[in-house]
Image (cartoon, grey):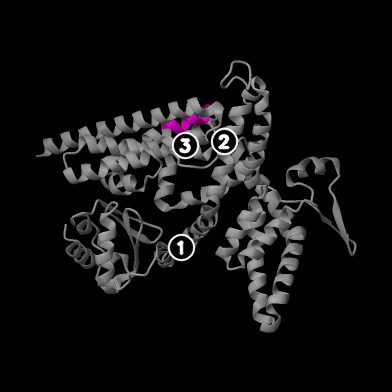
C-alpha cells in the first residue's frame, strides 16, 4: 500500500492544502477540520485505496482507515500539509467554530461530563456489586448473600461507601471539570464544589424532609436568612455556579493589580461566587433540577411503551447530530438521585439502538456482493454491538439507507420492550452487549431479551429490504 500516494489523493479530493484547517488521527480515523466543506469530494474519497468510509460530525470530517493504516496515512498527510503537531482537541476546536449555538452548547456539556465518566462508571458498577450482595433471592433462594454469609456484611458496607463517594462529591468533580471549560482556575472550581457539599451544611438529600418539617438551618446575616443546604448529587447548580466563578475570576484579574492578584482574586472569587450560589443561583437551579428529573420520570412512567418506542426511534438521529452527548448530563442527574429515580432509563434504550445499528450493518454485510463494503460492514457491525456505532452508522447504514431503516425498526421495538419492563441502569458504560454489567439486577433478563429483539428485528428488516432492493434492481435491468 502506497501511503504517500493515498495521502496525496486524499489531499487533492479535500480541496488542497489551503483547505485543511486542522488534521489529527485517533485509533482508526483521520480527523479533519476543513475551511470549506463544499470543496471536499466525499464520494471520490471513498474510492481511495484503504478508505473504509467517511462521515461528518461536530464540524469534522472523519475518514475511516482502520488501526495501523491510519497512522501511516497521517504521517504522509502531515508532511504534505505541515500540520504534524496537532491533536484531536485542535481538530475539535477548529470544527466547533463552524457549529451553531446549539451544537456548541451540546459539545460544551460533552467536554464537561466526558472526563468525569470513569468516576461515575466506577461508582455505579460498585453499586451494582453491592446490590448483588444485598438483593434477596438473586443468587440464593429467599436470602441475600450477606444474609447467608454474615461475615460478608462489612465487605458490602465498605463497597457501598466506595460506590457512593463519586455521587456524594459529584459537585467537586463537576466543578473541577466545568471550570476548565469555562476558563476558571480548576482548583478554585474544586474548592467551590467542596463548599457546596461541606459537612456543616444540611445534606442535600435531606432537604425535602427538612422543608416539610420546617427544620432547614439558616445563616442570619444583616437581617437576611440564607439556607445552609448542601448540593450533594446536584448537577445544574454546580454548572451555573462554576460559570459565575469563571466570570467573576476573569473580571477580577482585569481590575486587580498583578502584585495583589494571587492574594485577592482567589479570596474574592470564592466569596462572591459562594454568596451568589447560596442566595440566588443554588435555590433556583436546585428546584429547576428537581422539576427536570421529576418531569423526565413522569414522561417515562406515563408514556410507557409508546415513550420507549419513540425514544428508541429518535436516538440514532440524535447521534447523527451529536445531540446524544447532552444525555450525559441528564443521566448523571438521574444516577445522582438514584434513591428516587432508580437509575437511568436512557442507557438501556441507547443500548438497544446501538445493538440494532450493529445488527443492521451485519445484515448488510452478509447480503452485499460489494467486497469493499462487506469488509467495512462486518467489523463495523461487531463494533456497534459493543457500543461504538459511528463506523457502522456513517460508513454503511446511512450511506445505503435501508440498513438505517432496519436499525430504527429494531431500536423502536426493543425500546418499547425494555420500557415496558422498566429496565434501568445504575451506571454508565458501553451501551451495547457489555452494558449488562451496568443494569440493575432486576432488569438484566429483560435487557438481554431486549437486545435479542433489537438484533433480530433490525437484522430481519434490513435483510428483507436488501433482498427487495436487489430484486428491484434486477427487474429494472
- Give me the residue at 21% from left, 42% from top: 374
Q: Name the residue under label 3.
A: 435
In the rendered image, the residue lying farthest to the right is 223
Residue 255 x %, y %: 68, 81
Task: Provide residue 377's location: percent of width, then percent of height.
Answer: 26, 42
User: How busy is the neighbourhood of tag 3: few (under 14 within 10 Å), some, or many (20 plus)?
Assistant: many
Q: Going by the image, does 96 lie left or right of 238?
A: left
User: Is residue 42 visible in this depiction of the protein?
Assistant: yes
Q: Which residue lies under the disc numbered 2?
A: 300
Query: Mark 3 and mark 2: span between their CA atoms?
Result: 20 Å
Magenta span main SS:
helix
Q: Are marks 3 and 2 in contact (CB under 8 Å)?
A: no
Tell me which numbered mark, 1 or 3, is placed earlier along the sequence: 1
> From the image, which quarter does the C terminus lie in?
top left
Determine the secondary structure under disc 1: loop
Circle 2: element type: helix
Quarter of the image for residue 1 reads bottom left
Q: Residues within 10 Å of mark 1 (few under 14, many from 20)?
A: few
Where does residue 330 sit, x and y in percent of width and height? 57, 47
Does the image show residue 294? no
Q: What element carries label 3?
A: helix
Amino acid at each position: 500500500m502506497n501511503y504517500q500516494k493515498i495521502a496525496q489523493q486524499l489531499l487533492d479530493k479535500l480541496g488542497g492544502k489551503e483547505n485543511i484547517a486542522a488534521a489529527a488521527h485517533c485509533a482508526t480515523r483521520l480527523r479533519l477540520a476543513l475551511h470549506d466543506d463544499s470543496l471536499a469530494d466525499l464520494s471520490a474519497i471513498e474510492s481511495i485505496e484503504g478508505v473504509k468510509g467517511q462521515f461528518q460530525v461536530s464540524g469534522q470530517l472523519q475518514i475511516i482507515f482502520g488501526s495501523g493504516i491510519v497512522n501511516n496515512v497521517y504521517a504522509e498527510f502531515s508532511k504534505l500539509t505541515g500540520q504534524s503537531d496537532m491533536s484531536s482537541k485542535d481538530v475539535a476546536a477548529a470544527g466547533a467554530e463552524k457549529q451553531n449555538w446549539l451544537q456548541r452548547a451540546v459539545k460544551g456539556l460533552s467536554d464537561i461530563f466526558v472526563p468525569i465518566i470513569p468516576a461515575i462508571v466506577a461508582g455505579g458498577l460498585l453499586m451494582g456489586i453491592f446490590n448483588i450482595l444485598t438483593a434477596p433471592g438473586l443468587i440464593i433462594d429467599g436470602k441475600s448473600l450477606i444474609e447467608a454469609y454474615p461475615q460478608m456484611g462489612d465487605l458490602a458496607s465498605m463497597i457501598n461507601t466506595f460506590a457512593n463517594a463519586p455521587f456524594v462529591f459529584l459537585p467537586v468533580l463537576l466543578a473541577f471539570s466545568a471550570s476548565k471549560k469555562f476558563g476558571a482556575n480548576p482548583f478554585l472550581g474544586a474548592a467551590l464544589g467542596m463548599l457546596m457539599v461541606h459537612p456543616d451544611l444540611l445534606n442535600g438529600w435531606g432537604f425535602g424532609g427538612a422543608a416539610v418539617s420546617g427544620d432547614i438551618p439558616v445563616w442570619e446575616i444583616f437581617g437576611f436568612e440564607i439556607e445552609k443546604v448542601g448540593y450533594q448529587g446536584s448537577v445544574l447548580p454546580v454548572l451555573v455556579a462554576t460559570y459565575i466563578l469563571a466570570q467573576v475570576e476573569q473580571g477580577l484579574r482585569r481590575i486587580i493589580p498583578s502584585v495583589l492578584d494571587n492574594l485577592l482574586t482567589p479570596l474574592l472569587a470564592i466569596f462572591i461566587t459562594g454568596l451568589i450560589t447560596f442566595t440566588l443561583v443554588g435555590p433556583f437551579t436546585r428546584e429547576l433540577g428537581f422539576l427536570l428529573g421529576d418531569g423526565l420520570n413522569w414522561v417515562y412512567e406515563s408514556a410507557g411503551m409508546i415513550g420507549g418506542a419513540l425514544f428508541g426511534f429518535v436516538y440514532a438521529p440524535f447521534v447523527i447530530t451529536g445531540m446524544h452527548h447532552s444525555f450525559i448530563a441528564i443521566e448523571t442527574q438521574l444516577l445522582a438521585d438514584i434513591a428516587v429515580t432508580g437509575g437511568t432509563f436512557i442507557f438501556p434504550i441507547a443500548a438497544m439502538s446501538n445493538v440494532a445499528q450493529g445488527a443492521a450493518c451485519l445484515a448488510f454485510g452478509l447480503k452485499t456482493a460489494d467486497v469493499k463494503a462487506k469488509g467495512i460492514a462486518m467489523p463495523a457491525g461487531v463494533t456497534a454491538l459493543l457500543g461504538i456505532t459511528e463506523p457502522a452508522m456513517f460508513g454503511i447504514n446511512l450511506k445505503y439507507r435501508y440498513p438505517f431503516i432496519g436499525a430504527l425498526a429494531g431500536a423502536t421495538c426493543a425500546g418499547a420492550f425494555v420500557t415496558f419492563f422498566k429496565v434501568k441502569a445504575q451506571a454508565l458504560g458501553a451501551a451495547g452487549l457489555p452494558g449488562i454489567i451496568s443494569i440493575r439486577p432486576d432488569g438484566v433478563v429483560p435487557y438481554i431479551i431486549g437486545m435479542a429483539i433489537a438484533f433480530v428485528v433490525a437484522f430481519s428488516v434490513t435483510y428483507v429490504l436488501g433482498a427487495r432492493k436487489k430484486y428491484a434492481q434486477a427487474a429494472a435491468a
